[in-house]
């Protein structure tokens, strides 16, 4: 009898249960995440010490404004105006009143403080999830006071990584060709700056023409092309030590040397025996190896991040198109099939996309396509623009854009621009002179 | 000997009677199998759907037992709810009912009279307007013209009514199915639209990865969330899945930002636990 009752009970239980209702959320808003960057708090003694050392009135505010600017330019975050803040920086750093921050619609909050300890700058910061009312991250950095801008960039990278799940790109530098003078007689110098345009420095004097500087993805080494007595010469320059060496003189037209992902080789194209092919050079033993052997013009080679493939452009089909091949030169495959001419392919550090310049009906486009050539997306269109270079996280491209001159030959300018993969976040990077051929470094803090 | 023959024959007769009685009963059994519920039931808003099912159930029961039908008939509660301020004189109203009912109800006079008396007793003649009368008239048609039930019910409910008619009954199982079908499309849409607005999708996610986060919620009747649980929690700590944590956090933020959720006003038992499947792939690929 008891068994029967239990059986009956067991049968009836599921009759009264309800299936769990599932609701699929496949859409959301792609608006930048609203976040508040509270000024880093600083005590009066430290503030005076930094004012004396750095000539900055409030170093806490300066660092927080670097973070705010970086996050804003990424296009993924929307820093809320400081005027809306309800809580003072020093109190917010101890214990944020989350109600106050959620009231101004902040979903994340950055607080922190700055101290002057033993002639050094000590910065600690915290990232808070306002809605969950919990701390997401807390870190402290100690460095020489003159490094304060880098601290701001490193904090930006940490916040970016914690909130997006991918590495940041703020603690990086950009090398480019600084241009001055009339268009017919340009003085071209090698220059380097932080990714936000600060700390600009010229690396060459402008006596010789410099072209296509490229960062080594594995170090702070740069390779570039310069003309010495009208002959193209490939150089290596160590940014940290300033030492420079000649890799070699190459015949005829030489183009765009670029490092392999491990930094041990450079790959470039040059004309030999009346045809332009792709070659690699081992930087240790200086052995040159021919990779392509085709009567057409093959130029602009770029390695995939795993070093197994190379993308390049070639006119072997009659028009300039993008191809990929194995790193030994086998299995050459055309991947671009759209209308127009395709050039300067660059493999993304993330490995998933290839950026390119496209010329179609008199206009230049910067675009990306998948490595099989599918999914072509044109991110920006202009009168003249080219030479895309990837940010180390493969999310942003930097390139240069030239403006049209008027009838009198005036109004020409060349400027650096960046655009992210959405195609919406396009920004000019301010440089003291005209600029071209930018190349983005890897993260300095790695 | 005779006695045992008698006993044997009595038992045999009893067996035959029992078999004869039980066989048709057994054969009827399959008719009582819970009917298949039309898929459309899920999509019809609960508010409009529910009144029809019990009503149809009542109607069919009453059709089956015509004697009880009249005595059980009563103006539905809804009639009172739809009362308006329009005041119609009792005389006019009664006249209208009397005038209309004989046309619509082809039944013996006795039944008609009973209905009329019921109407007079239960309805407040002072507050019945034209609309109300139409409803009551509609009810009567339902009752006395069983072949026409499906046509009388709103066209959108036509299939439902037919299913019910074919099966001749609404079982408890079917009622439960109606409740168990989850949220209606309109309820689901309201909830989705609310969360769409709250969910800031992290734009840096790798779009060629699995970007599905399943979150189970426990809700209060007012839609506020008492508990959230990430169902694939283990994935957060796997190497190379750092983006998943970011995605899960963004989904949790969306839930918190959206509180209280726009849940249906009824049927708390159904949705007191909800599972939200956040999938960013469509947005990031598109």
Image: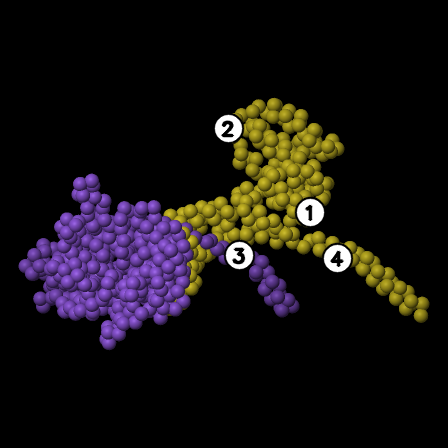
Helix, strand or loop status at disc 4? helix
Q: CA distance from mark 3 to mark 4?
A: 31 Å
Mark 4 — on which chain does it sit?
B
Chain of the residue where label 1 is placed in the rendered structure? B
- Residue B43 on image: x %, y %: 54, 46
Chain letter for mark 3: A
Crowding at dot 1, Cα within 10 Å, few <14 / some 14-19 / many 20+, comes out as few
User: Who's the residue at 50% across and 28% down the image?
Assistant: B85
Q: Is residue A85 visible?
A: no
Query: Mark 3 Cα within 10 Å, few/some/many (few <14, many 20+)?
Result: some
Q: Which chain is yellow?
A: B
For marks 1 and 4, the one nearer the N-term is 4
Pointer 2 or 4: first along the chain: 4
Badges 1 and 3, same chain: no
Residue found at the far bottom of this picture: A285
Measure the alpha-carbon separation of dots 1 and 3.
27 Å
Co-location on one chain, circles 2 and 3 = no
Q: Is residue A55 left or right of residue A420?
A: left
Q: Is residue B36 visible?
A: yes
Disc 3 with disc 4 on a shared chain: no
Specify the label residue B26 is tagged with: 4
The x and y percentages for residue A95 are 23, 58
Q: Which residue is mark 1?
A: B166
- Label 2, label 3: how far apart the Cα atoms are: 41 Å
The reply to whether the C-beta atoms of the residues labelled 1 and 4 are less than 8 Å apart is no
- Is label 1 on the same chain as label 2? yes
Colour seen for chain A? purple
Is the Cβ of the residue at disc 2 closer than 8 Å to that at disc 3?
Answer: no
Residue at coordinates 22% horizontally, 66% vertically from top-left?
A250
């Amino acid at each position: 009898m008891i068994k029967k009752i239990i059986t009956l009970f067991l049968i009836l239980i599921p009759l009264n249960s309800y299936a769990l209702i599932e609701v699929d959320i496949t859409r959301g808003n792609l608006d930048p995440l609203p976040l508040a960057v509270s000024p880093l708090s600083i005590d009066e003694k430290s503030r005076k010490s930094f004012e004396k050392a750095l000539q900055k009135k409030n170093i806490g505010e300066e660092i927080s404004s670097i973070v705010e600017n970086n996050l804003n330019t990424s296009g993924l975050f929307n820093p809320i105006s400081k005027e809306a803040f309800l809580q003072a920086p020093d109190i917010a750093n101890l214990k944020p009143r989350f109600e106050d921050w959620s009231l101004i619609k902040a979903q994340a909050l950055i607080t922190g403080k700055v101290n002057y300890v033993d002639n050094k700058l000590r910065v600690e910061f915290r990232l808070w999830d306002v809605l969950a009312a919990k701390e997401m991250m807390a870190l402290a950095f100690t460095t020489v006071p003159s490094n304060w801008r880098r601290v701001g960039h490193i904090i930006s990278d940490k916040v970016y990584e914690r909130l997006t799940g991918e590495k940041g790109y703020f603690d990086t530098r950009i090398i480019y060709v600084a241009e001055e003078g009339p268009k017919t007689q340009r003085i071209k110098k090698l220059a380097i700056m932080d990714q936000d345009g600060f700390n600009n420095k010229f690396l060459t004097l402008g006596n010789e023409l410099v072209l296509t500087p490229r960062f080594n993805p594995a170090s702070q080494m740069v390779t570039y092309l310069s003309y010495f007595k009208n002959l193209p010469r490939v150089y290596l320059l160590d940014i940290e030590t300033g030492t420079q060496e000649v890799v070699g003189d190459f015949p005829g037209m030489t183009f765009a040397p670029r490092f392999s992902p491990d930094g041990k080789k450079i790959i470039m194209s040059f004309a030999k025996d009346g045809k332009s092919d792709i070659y690699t050079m081992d930087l240790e033993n200086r052995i040159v190896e021919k990779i392509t052997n085709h009567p057409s013009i093959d130029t602009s080679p770029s390695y995939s991040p795993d070093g197994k493939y190379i993308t390049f452009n070639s006119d072997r089909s009659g028009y300039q198109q993008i191809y990929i091949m194995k790193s030994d030169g086998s299995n050459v495959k055309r991947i671009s099939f759209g209308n127009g001419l395709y050039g300067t392919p660059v493999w993304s550090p993330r490995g998933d996309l290839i950026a390119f310049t496209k010329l179609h009906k008199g206009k230049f486009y910067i675009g990306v396509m998948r490595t099989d050539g599918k999914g072509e997306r044109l991110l920006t269109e202009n009168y003249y623009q080219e030479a895309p270079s990837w940010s180390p996280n493969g999310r942003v491209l930097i390139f240069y854009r030239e403006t049209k001159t008027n009838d009198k030959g005036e109004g020409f300018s060349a400027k650096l621009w960046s655009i992210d993969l959405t195609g919406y976040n396009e920004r000019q990077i301010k440089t003291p002179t005209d600029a071209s051929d930018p190349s983005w470094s890897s993260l300095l803090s790695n | 000997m005779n006695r045992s023959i008698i006993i044997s024959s009595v038992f045999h007769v009893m067996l035959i009677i029992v078999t004869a009685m039980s066989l048709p009963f057994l054969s009827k059994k399959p008719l009582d199998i819970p009917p298949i519920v039309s898929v459309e039931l899920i999509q019809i808003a609960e508010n409009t759907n529910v009144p029809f099912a019990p009503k149809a159930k009542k109607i069919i029961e009453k059709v089956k037992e015509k004697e009880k039908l009249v005595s059980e008939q009563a103006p539905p509660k809804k009639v009172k709810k739809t009362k308006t301020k329009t005041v119609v004189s009792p005389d006019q109203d009664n006249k209208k009912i009397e005038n209309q009912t004989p046309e619509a109800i082809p039944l013996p006079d006795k039944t008609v009279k009973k209905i009329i008396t019921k109407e007079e007793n239960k309805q407040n003649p002072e507050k019945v307007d034209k609309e109300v009368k139409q409803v009551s008239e509609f009810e009567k048609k339902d009752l006395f013209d069983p072949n026409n039930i499906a046509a009388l019910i709103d066209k959108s409910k036509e299939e439902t009514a037919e299913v019910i008619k074919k099966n001749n009954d609404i079982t408890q199982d079917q009622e439960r199915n109606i409740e168990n079908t989850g949220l209606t499309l309109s309820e689901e849409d309201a909830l989705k639209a609310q969360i769409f607005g709250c969910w800031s999708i992290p734009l840096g996610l790798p779009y060629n990865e699995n970007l599905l986060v399943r979150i189970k919620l426990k809700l209060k009747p007012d839609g506020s969330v008492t508990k959230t649980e990430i169902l694939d929690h283990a994935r957060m700590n796997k190497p190379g899945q750092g983006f998943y944590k970011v995605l899960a956090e963004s989904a949790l933020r969306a839930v918190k930002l959206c509180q209280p959720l726009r849940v249906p006003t009824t049927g708390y038992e159904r949705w007191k636990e909800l599972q939200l499947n956040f999938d960013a792939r469509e947005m990031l690929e598109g």
